[in-house]
């Protein structure tokens, strides 16, 4: 099994041995119902912390044993789920005043998640019709103390609601730059779930070079834009000045990548400089847009779909990055 921990476009895959899997996990995996009902794990945790509820603790350790193990060991990293006294340590962690403030805001903003459930149900129905092997994930919410937006373990997806409290949420300004806050909105929950889950399901970890990563990310965003009926640039969060800069300098950026032998680089630092959110791209100076690799990847996929109109979006899911590039006719 894999745990995928997400921050921006970084994929970290950890192999873990799960000793607490129960029959509940098998039931979740076998679910074939595309109607999404998000599990409010955060509310069960709140009952345990606020009320010292023994029944809530039992649910955390039995009904939601995998979520609890992932939270303790991988998200919060406060110990091993089997450690003596780990329950007290977990409760003490969540009683911290800052974490309690996050919980209050989550309760205020997320009394229900009906809009997200409706959108995801429609999207997963369409994905299941497009690919009969597609596994509809089980989605749950948690308060992660600002650690991880999305965590994935096979077909289990956890959403840290405290990472989606709005760009102007006061506490964020103490910990994040403006470019980091721009996607910390409720409207980003569904796109983030889809991006990271589809990336995990359709082989995002197989891409090594900058060009492969650019095109793979562009492909997933293109499909999400189609499913959510949004313009590609908007779905990739290129709006306003960032979008305008990319459109005006696209040819220049592409030539720079080619001239500096960047497209085939596997250097992680160089790749992240062009894929991760930044204030600007250092190679192009202050005032430039960031995530230029993502922008170009999206344009290559767009060209591929325009030049191959017989290709359905369903087929795009299984098309590798090299094939897309070679048949895109991309030439800005």
Image: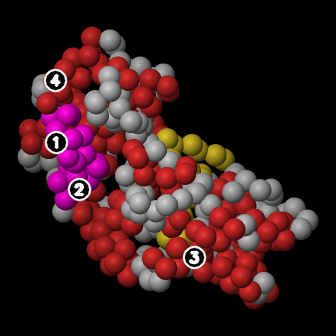
**In the rendered structure, which segment of residues is drawn in magenta?**
230-247
Q: Residue furthest right?
A: 84
Tell me the distance, in whole angstroms, between the alpha carbons under discs 4 and 2.
24 Å
Which dot marks residue 104? 3
The crowd level at tag 4 (other Cα within 10 Å; few <14, some 14-19, many 20+) is few
Q: Is residue 240 left or right of residue 82?
A: left
Q: Secondary structure at mark 3?
A: helix
Looking at the picture, how far across and down is residue 145, in whole percent? 62, 61
Placement of the N terminus among the 4 image quadrants = bottom right
Give x and y (percent) for residue 112.
Answer: 44, 83
Secondary structure found at label 1: helix
Task: Give the alpha-carbon distance from disc 3 to disc 1, as whole Å.
Answer: 42 Å
Comes first in the chain, label 4 or label 1: 4
At a point 73% along the width and 53% down the height, the residue shown is: 77
Q: Are marks 4 and 3 in contact (CB under 8 Å)?
A: no
The earlier-in-sequence mark between 4 and 3 is 3
Q: CA distance from mark 2 to mark 3?
A: 33 Å
Are the residues tagged 3 and 1 within 8 Å (C-beta)?
A: no
Residue 180 percent location from the top left of the image? 44, 47
Q: Is residue 277 above or below residue 239?
A: above
- What residue is pinned by disc 2? 225
Q: Which mark is residue 251?
A: 4
Residue 211, can we see it?
no
């Amino acid at each position: 099994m894999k745990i995928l921990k997400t921050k921006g476009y970084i994929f970290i895959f950890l192999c873990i041995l799960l000793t607490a899997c129960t029959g509940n996990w098998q039931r979740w995996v076998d679910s074939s119902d595309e109607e999404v009902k998000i599990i409010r794990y955060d509310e069960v945790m709140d009952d345990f912390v606020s009320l010292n509820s023994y029944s809530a603790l039992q649910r955390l350790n039995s009904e939601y044993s995998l979520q609890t193990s992932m939270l303790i060991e991988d998200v919060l990293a406060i110990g091993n789920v089997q450690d003596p006294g780990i329950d007290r340590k977990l409760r003490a962690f969540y009683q911290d005043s800052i974490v309690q403030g996050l919980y209050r805001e989550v309760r205020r903003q997320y009394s229900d998640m009906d809009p997200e459930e409706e959108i995801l149900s429609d999207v997963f129905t369409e994905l299941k019709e497009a690919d009969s092997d597609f596994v509809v994930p089980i989605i749950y919410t948690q308060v992660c103390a600002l650690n991880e937006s999305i965590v994935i373990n096979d077909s289990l997806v956890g959403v840290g609601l405290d990472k989606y409290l709005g760009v102007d949420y006061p506490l964020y300004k103490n910990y994040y730059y403006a470019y980091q806050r721009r996607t910390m909105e409720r409207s980003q929950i569904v796109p983030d779930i889809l991006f990271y889950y589809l990336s995990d399901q359709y082989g995002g970890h197989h891409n090594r070079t900058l060009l492969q990563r650019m095109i793979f990310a562009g492909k997933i965003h293109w499909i999400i834009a189609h499913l959510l009926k949004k313009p590609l640039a908007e779905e990739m969060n290129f709006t306003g000045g960032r979008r305008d800069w990319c459109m005006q300098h696209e040819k220049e950026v592409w030539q720079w990548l080619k001239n500096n032998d960047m497209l085939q680089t596997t250097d992680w630092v160089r790749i992240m400089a062009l894929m991760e959110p930044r204030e600007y791209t250092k190679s192009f100076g202050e005032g430039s847009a960031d995530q230029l690799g993502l922008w170009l990847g999206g344009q290559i996929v767009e060209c591929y779909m325009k030049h191959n109109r017989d290709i359905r979006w369903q087929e795009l899911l299984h098309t590798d990055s090299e094939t897309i590039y070679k048949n895109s006719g991309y030439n800005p």
